[in-house]
Image (tube, grey):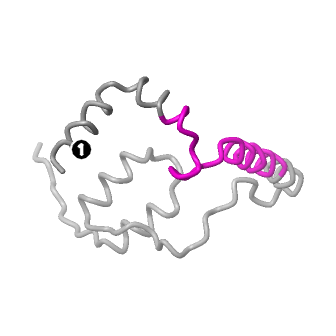
Amino acid sequence: MERKVGSSTVTAKEVKAALEKTRTLSAEEEKVLRMRHGAGASSTRAPLPRAAGDNAELADELLVIEMQLMKAMRARAGGKPVASASSTPVATRARDAAANPTKDKIVRALRKKK
């Protein structure tokens, strides 16, 4: 029995269209196929697909979770205000220098070079 080998050409457009339709590939598999066939990634300007699809109840739940996460993120970022070097008290700067002897050594060496 001879093995029949048929040749067919797969274009980058066909691969790109097939990859947009399928949802069973892992990210790594998709990357390999795109690289192998020269199919670029989807448009970066295209909107991301909604995880909830047409389910309004699930969309509402996801929105509530997203709002809670954003609130927590803002609280976390707001909890640690960034202070400038001029507004930092001298005692705090001294404590930081004592906490990091390597940094203190580098600063002293740079001051000697002046």
**What residue is drawn where x is 80% and y is 45%?**
68
- Measured as percent of width and height from the top left, residue 79 is found at 71, 42
- Measured as percent of width and height from the top left, residue 65 is found at 79, 45
Q: Is residue 107 left or right of residue 112?
A: right
103 shown above or below 77:
above
- Is 104 or 8 nearer to us in this picture? 104
Q: Is residue 47 left or right of residue 13?
A: right
- Magenta segment: does it hold 70? yes
Q: Quadrant of residue 7?
A: bottom left
- Measured as percent of width and height from the top left, residue 111 is found at 24, 44
Quarter that holds the N terminus: top left
The kind of secondary structure the magenta stretch mainly shows is helix
- Is 50 or 4 nearer to us in this picture? 50
Q: Amino acid at mark 1?
A: Arg
Q: Which residues are magenta?
A: 64-93
34 shown above or below 79:
below
- Magenta segment: does it hold 53? no
Q: Is residue 78 left or right of residue 87?
A: right
22 shown above or below 109:
below
Task: Name the residue tied to disc 1.
Answer: 111
